[in-house]
Amino acid sequence: MPKTPFFWYGNMAGAIAGWVFIIAGLIFPLTGALKILWIVITVLWVAGHPLELIAALPIARSAGYTPGQAVINTLIFGITWWIPVKLGVFQP
């Protein structure tokens, strides 16, 4: 995995784009393949990000992040936040 902040910030932007897509899908009706994509992304983000807390909390704690910071960042950014923390790319 690259150890450059630029790489990880780009991936974090993708996580934000996923949340924007989820919210847009709640507001505007989607059909066809776009609706299927919305369902898949929604399930991955809504179920996946909380499950990642199992791995993220110990990593964040050992890096010096508070539990609150770890929870918020993991729920928003998921793996694109805690992997670079583990790699030492991001520090509190």
Image (cartoon, rainbow, N blue to C red):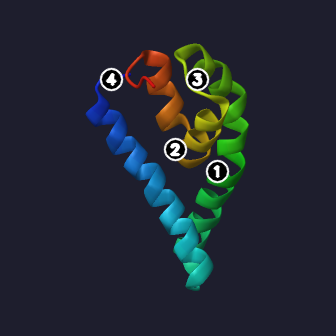
What's the distance in space between the residues labelled 4 and 3, CA to CA? 19 Å
Q: Which residue is mark 1?
A: 44
Disc with the residue nearer the chain's start (4 vs 3): 4
Can you give x and y, in whole percent of width and height, for residue 88 in the image?
A: 41, 16
Can you give x and y, in whole percent of width and height, for residue 38 in the image?
A: 58, 67
Number of marks in picture: 4
Look at label 3 and name its amino acid: Ala
Disc with the residue nearer the chain's start (3 vs 1): 1
Q: Badge 3 local density, few (<14 within 10 Å), some, or many (20+)?
A: many
Disc with the residue nearer the chain's start (2 vs 1): 1
Disc with the residue nearer the chain's start (2 vs 4): 4
Of tags 4 and 3, the one toward the viewer is 3
Q: Which residue is mark 4?
A: 2
Q: Which residue is mark 3?
A: 60
For numbered disc 3, what is the local secondary structure?
helix
Q: Quadrant of residue 68?
A: top right
